[in-house]
Amino acid sequence: MHDFAMHQPSTLAEALALLDEHGYDARPIAGGTALVLLMKQSLALPEHLVNLDAVADADGLRGVRLEADGLHIGALTRHREVETSAVVREFAPLLADVYARVATVRIRNAATVGGGLAHADPSQDPPAALLALDARVEVASTGGTRTLPLEELFVDYYESALEPGELITEFVVPRPAWGSRGAYLKFLPRTEDDYATVAAAALGRIEGGVCRDVRVGLIAVGPTPVRARAVEEALEGEAASLEAVRRASEAVVDVVDPLDDVRGSAAYKRDMAVVFTRRALERALGLAAS
Amino acid sequence: MRLTVNGQSTEVDAPANRLLVDLLRDDLGLTGTKEACSVGVCGACTVLLDGAPVASCLMLAAQVEGREVTTIEGLASTERLHPLQEAFIEHGGFQCGICTPGQVVAAKALLDSNPAPTAEDVREWMTGNLCRCTGYYQIIEAIMAAAGSPDA
Amino acid sequence: MADPFVLGRPTPRVEGVEKVTGAARYAGDVKLPGMLHGALLHSSRPYARLVSVDTSAARDLPGVRAVITGEDVGQHLYGRRIKDMPVLARGFVRYAGERIAAVAADSEDIARRAVDLIEVEYEDLEPVFDIEEALTDGAPLLHPNHGDYPGARAQETPSNAYMWSVNDRGDLDAGFAEADLVIEHTYRTERVHQAYLEPHIALVSLEGGRVHVWTTTKAPQSIRDALAFTVDVPREDIVLHHSHIGGDFGGKGTPLNLPIAYFLAQAAGAPVRLAADYIQELMAGNPRHATLTTLRTGVKRDGTITAHHARFRVNCGAYAAYKPNGVIGGAQRAAGPYRIPNTRIESIQVYTNTVPGGHMRAPGSPQAVFALESHLDEVARELGLDPLEFRERNLVREGDETAWGDRLEHLKAHETLDAAIDTSRYRASASEGRGRKVGRGIAVGDHGSGGGIGNAEVRLHPGGAVTLGTPIFDQGSGTYTTLQQVVAEELHVPTSRITLEIWDTDETDDDSGIGGSRATRVNTRTAHEAALEARAALVRLVAERLDVAEDTIALEGDEVRIEGDGGRVERWPELLSRWEETAVGRARVEDREAIRLTGFVAQVAEVAVDEETGEIEVLGITTAHDVGRVLNPIGHQGQINGGVVQGLGYALMEHLGVEDGRVTTLSFGDYKIPSTADLPPLRTALVEGEEGIGPYRIKGIGETPNVPVAAAIANAVEDAVGVRIRDLPITAEKVYRALQAQREREGQA
């Protein structure tokens, strides 16, 4: 691995100052599971690493907090913590479920939620559910803070909307509409520890026999995680039925743009995106037979 | 830098780009931890960081400053093996042995947090500790047996 | 064998404590003072003329101690049998991944940085990747002078097919003429990696005028000889030291980077460690070969096979060097343990611009058996026969010749198949869930044990300790424990008193090492003889010291009973202490005869296929084996379990992806092997018997479990949803496409 300087800031302000000072030459590190791998393969060559784990707890970067506007999860919170948090499970079981499906427990113990989002890997699981849950991220820099809907965070393969010097400090999930249920389905035809061929998260509820507050997010279907608004719109207000879900799910082909790779051809992934969108919706809306 | 390795406070000089697995194997001579896939998939390099299993091939030594690392060398006391180690021997939970330190360390973390796992819990937890020799069946047996023993 | 003492009992590994505590030393754990670290430059082109390799910037990097290229080391060819591979490329590169240059430096980081500074100018040539392409007239010839390589056979006409053998029995044309139906299909298998978790490592030190080697090999004597030839050093000047081996499955019989490490150590004047990483393993290891097998079979309506023509074509990659015999066998397995009077079996070994293949668990068999056992299922279905009934009709019985012409003894094909059927759910009624259909498939196979040379020494020490000296480098399959059991059995001492002494290569002159289930056959016999020799030496010693006739002495465990002399009873541990003597028995066994015993395997797979996605869930695998006697049930079952799960990976997911000649699956993130969460329920049935090899009536078990799995699953998939997948791996997408095509056909009909 190349040489670099490791900085150990003790406050968030210090960390942001370091990131600001070194700009493109600096990268924040916390869990390191993605960044260290990129550095080992010479795909990232930062001259400065800013170790966020050195930042004191008081700066609110860690842990799960329930507030009036929803659930706040600090950027340095480990995947495993979200997966096992009783607060998260009570608030939105879908969120706990999706974090439980990331890689292996070894990675989940190290990887942070903020790092996972900033990495902008279109095959990472959490964004599927976070898009369905309408999450937003809070971003800080020496210049101040800003809020980004999650959808706007992802720009392209491994490319986020973060500017040099910016850091995700937390993400916030508004409370889902009362009675909503979610489902995350990950298509793993090879092994359980593989990346998804495609995966879909769905959230929604049925009120008076009609679909309401339907949300669908997908991963591994293109350059970024995607929210399938076309599907949501096709189902919103429709009488809940397997047929309606089937019809609405077809619309997902217009929002996906997969690549051929070892997990399947683009055409296959497009077809599977439809199947898994439909199955996730059926499960979330309680329509699935079985 | 300072860290605790297998219960012992340790001070070691290492450049910023030293990986934890190399720190353990090369600087501290603890070669029980193995490196195989180098991309965090296979589990051969599993160590416990403050009790939780992590991939030491994807972690910089500088990230564990002041923290507690447990490796395979930290499991057995001088006079006796850890019950998991006994069970791996008795049930054929290894063949070539290269993945075994990672398997045993990962299994220890499981039993520490879940002393009476189901076979399903074991299969799920151990996913990603790859083994090409055993086909895993005897590893699962060994872990279940260790969990059943009063010492586990 | 009356009342075995320890054989047949579950016996934990002799090296168990070392391995579970992390104390076991592997080649990667060995460090030498002043040791340098190597790195390699691999070709990025599948086929090119090397115009220039400029290493000047690499040499100038501080910390670099040596840089070598093919021009620096000169003409040194490497190969287990056919010596066709330069240590470092000279003139041409013939696959993407070929080793071009090497660096030794103070650290691995520096070595890698130096490699990045080497500039190569290529002149691209038209490459050839596929077997069929390589066999066409006018295809680029990879080795026009193949016949000049040491170990190669002369070619009449230069061709990429460097070996083409034809085995004819009976009258093939008459056999086809006699058939009611002639059915032909072609089956394709892809390259897969052995996926041992320990990448290859070579550490070479030229200390004291000798070549000291620590490397990941299970065939140390043969690697020593190959290295001696390649680097032109007398074999007695080379010594391979023992270290544990982190998995093999056939892939650790070739030294890969060892000759390069030697030349680096020589150039740098210091020990050099050349450790492969997994990228290099997947790009430029020695994977299982891709094959193309065309099978044409004549059958009568009643299910009798009248003729069978197998064309087994092996994609050997750019060099034959990694194949211990120069070729990949297995062609005869494409005809199988069936009674077929008229056969033609062709084996065609083809050079292409791809990574050279090596050995992997039952080399050639998984490919050939996938083809044959899939094909026979198709033939049975075409005839309207149950695939089980069809096999029962044609499987060899005592007295029959196999399709290859072997007349084997004590055939247990039918018993093994029956055991698999009885233990499995083959006869259970089909069931379906929503969108999922269940099916079951059978496949069978057989494999004999290889021969070779074995050595062992047993020493009885004062006080009762026993040492077992062995030149074996156990790759993990448990040979040490088996040998320890054998010695315990013959001496009637507990295994705990027998310590292992693993020799370096100086201790013996020739030894075949591990491979081809040889350990079971040759090495148990060797340990047996060494133990008997040690007993005999003890008896001679007692006779001499106590001045009694040898035939009055009886040994039972530690007791030495002397007839007459008032029924005197002594204990040998004390006698040896008193006399300060050691009783030594040494054995060298050469056993190369073709043996007339084989080990059968029959498997049943049960799958559920999701018709919407093509995803296959394996609901269960049953594996039945004809085993003779089992020496160590723990190790025996371990071989079965591991083999079946490897077979599962081969069937469903493993595939060294290659695009334009370049391997694309370059990590365990993309090259997936089964994990704990992917295991199907496994049922094992053992058909034990008294007919086996050697003094303990045993059979090899390491190879067969991985062989029929893919065909059993392919057959189960067809049983479930009516589509036939003829190329491995059987991915969800392939099944999905086949189901789509089926629906289209049905729509048209």
Image (tube, rainbow, N blue to C red):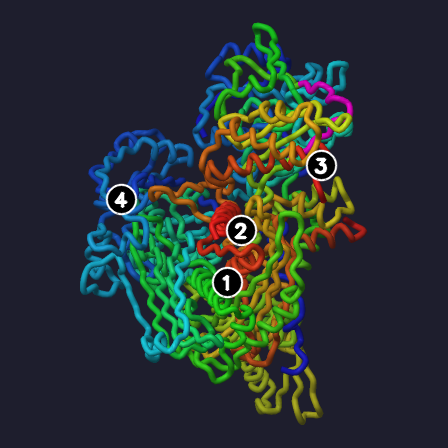
Q: Nearer the viewer, mark 3 or mark 1?
A: 3
As displayed, is residue C685 above or below residue B94? below
Answer whether residue C610 is magenta in the image: no
On the same chain, marks 4 and 2? The answer is yes
Q: Which residue is mark 1?
A: C707
Tell me the subunit letter for badge 1. C
Residue C73 in the image, given as x and y percentages of width and height: 25, 47
Q: Which residue is mark 3?
A: A287
Marks 3 and 2, how far apart in space?
57 Å
Q: Nearer the viewer, mark 4 or mark 3?
A: 3
Marks 3 and 1, how far apart in space?
43 Å
For residue C47, the mark is: 4
- First along the sequence among labels 4 and 2: 2
Q: Which residue is mark 2?
A: C25
Q: Amino acid at mark 4?
A: Tyr
* Residue C313 relative to residue B103: left or right: left
Answer whether residue A183 is magenta in the image: yes
Residue at 52% across, 38% down: B26
- First along the sequence among labels 1 and 2: 2
Under circle 3, the secondary element is loop
Marks 4 and 2, how far apart in space?
39 Å
Residue A66 in the image, given as x and y percentages of width and height: 76, 19
Residue at 32% across, 57% down: C320
